[in-house]
Image: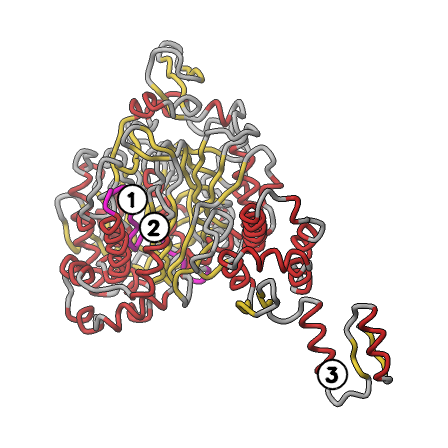
Amino acid sequence: VMQSSDPENLHYAHILKSNFINKNSQSLLEDLKSFINYYLGFGHFVYRDNMGRQIAVAKSMNEFEQYLKTIPEDSLVYHAMKNHFSLWLMARGEVKIAKIINPMKISDFSDMAEMRNFLLDLISKRRREMDKGKLVNYDETAAIDESNVVSLAGGSLGGKGRGLAFINTLIYGFELGKLTPGINIKSPVTMIIGTDEFDLFIETNKLRTVIKEEKNYENLKRKFLNCNLSFNLEKKLRSFLKLMDKPIAIRSSSLFEDSMSQPFSGIFGTYLLPNNNPDFDTRLKIIMDAIKLVFASIYSKSARTYFEAINYMIEQEKMAIVLQEVVGNRFEDAFYPHISGTAQSYNFYPVAHMRPGEGFALAAIGLGQYVVEGEKAYRFSPAYPALDIVSQKDISKNSQVYFFAVDMKKEKINLLEGENAGLIKLEIADSERHGTLKHCASVYNPDNDTIEPGIDSIGPRVVNFANILRYDYIPLAETIATVLDVVKEAFGTPVEIEYAVDLNLDKNGKADFYILQVKPLVGSGAGYNINLKKINEDKCLLISKRSMGNGKVDNIRDVVYIDPEKFNNTLTEAMAEEIDAINDKMLARRENYILIGPGRWGTRDRFIGVPVAWPQISQAKVIVEVSLPEFPLDASLGSHFFHNVTSMNVGYFSVDQASKDEFVKWDKLKREELVSEGKFFKHVRFRSPLKIRMDGKKRISIIEYTECS
């Protein structure tokens, strides 16, 4: 551009093929602005034909890309010849792609279609790069892959959604994978429906009154299914589903779920769907029905019981939804990952030279439901993965014998059957047939009480991941330790993760480690000190040296316990029903109690403990697991049960009666006032409140009583 106060210089500007601006012009600033916008690429991009006539105006990168798909070829040539594309992109700060486009010539392409596709592909790749590790709003041009989290509706993401968005940022924004070069760290394709949709669903379908009046949860679920999601969400789900051909998990993400202040787990619904019906509308309906049932799960008995226990108004709770692609591969009619599990940065049950702060992990074959529900998953320390925590015989005895997978035979699902409606339970032998057991199991030799790595020999299969944890087929333990350290540092508190592993190696020889969920752990710090030398054991009802919890409780008089003489591990399901009834009575009185019984509480394996769900014992302020002859403890909890116990600051004590340092005074319990006696449980009440003391650092807990005259 030539600027001059002499209008005569316009002639020279024409000779130089330059623009001319008169310095004395009344519109000098407007003339300069017009020049900058038009010739330097600032402002909107105006698509023109080869005669310079306006065709379309792009006000954003999105519009620029959309118009680029449809403009005539002569317009494409016009702008390419004048380098308009690179100028405009450079002005918008897209320096990287502008520098790629600028030196390109029309002659570098075989035809205009090739050039158009080159430009579109360049813009698409740049957008995906920019969106990595971010929460992006959904639109039909958005790139949906593992590198970002896509929002389908506004409002809060919920506790689980926040954790997933955070993890995605760690992986793809801060390149967490650089810390673990031997494996690919990923998160599954994830979309989140914010809580605005829940509010809209409740209001537009006039469900407030229904929720207050309908106390039967099964009836309430049916009423929710008869209601409609918003047209906007349905439209987005329809578009999203066209891109998804794998099974889909529909997960809850309520405001307080997995939050820092009052975290809890496993209370609300989660559905794993095969997503394989040949009719598209049927697939869409199943997904929308699952979303409605997750909304309804806020009002289940489990949820209501939980909210009562923490004095929280259920009307204040809101639900977001997480849609995740299920990690794994298809084997015959089953879909599952090679390995899934959980890991915690704080270990409440360290053995040998392990330290609590080193954490622990659980691993199993198949879907994670097996682990979080407290089945026989393999437990190991990420710091000492080759160290066996229990004896070879116990490892063999307690090895995983079945697993869960998505049932790909089911094209139609009745979601009212429950959260496992889309799943199938398979034997470990099925895993061996599928070829997924190869690196995950060993063979137990009873002749010399040894476990031999690999499955080449004949004998009982033992799922102990020896080829991975001992011989480093993949760096699983190292990866878990690194992820826990980074996430713990970022959260500023101990954490738990759920993960899955795909052992299929990529071209670089790496397996894939997926982080599915992250949540804070509470109850792991130390807040009370116990000096056993100063404790009068004569006044102790109980001493445990393997306990969880901190602080003191001085207002409990009630103890509910299983009479050891009446315990039969084939009748534990009936025991769960009996304690549920006792708990309901204590809930009605709003009083807490101490629960004592043999074996593992909260397990799904009814032969190793009482298979209670957390709401069945929600009023227990202290839970005690006791060993019996031929019934030892392995001190292992299901993730959901464990998480709720710790987050509610419930004491969890283990008492090994074979130890001279730990005990429960059964004779003292039998002398106290008997409130009620059932087939299995006795409910007794002390005249004075018991003194419960928990030392979280030393993991020592005691319960003292006062003799009344």
- Residue 609 lies in the magenta stretch: no
- Closer to viewer: mark 3 or mark 1: 3
Mark 1 surroundings within 10 Å by alpha-carbon count, few (fewer than 14), some (14 through 19), many (20 or more): many
> Where residue 610 sits in the image (x, y, percent)?
24, 41
Q: Residue at x 30, y 50 (%)?
A: 270
Image side of residue 550 versus residue 271, left or right: right
Of residues 418 and 692, the one nearer the viewer is 418
Amino acid type for the residue under numbered disc 2? Leu
User: Based on the displayed image, in which of its 4 quarters is residue 428 positioned?
Assistant: top left
Of residues 649 and 243, the one nearer the viewer is 243
Residue annotated with mark 3: 29
- Residue 266 lies in the magenta stretch: yes
Amino acid type for the residue under numbered disc 1? Asn
Amino acid type for the residue under numbered disc 3? Leu
Image side of residue 596 versus residue 487, left or right: left
Residue annotated with mark 1: 275
Query: What are the residue bounds of the magenta stretch?
Result: 260-279
Q: CA distance from mark 3 to mark 1?
A: 60 Å
Q: CA distance from mark 1 to mark 2?
A: 9 Å
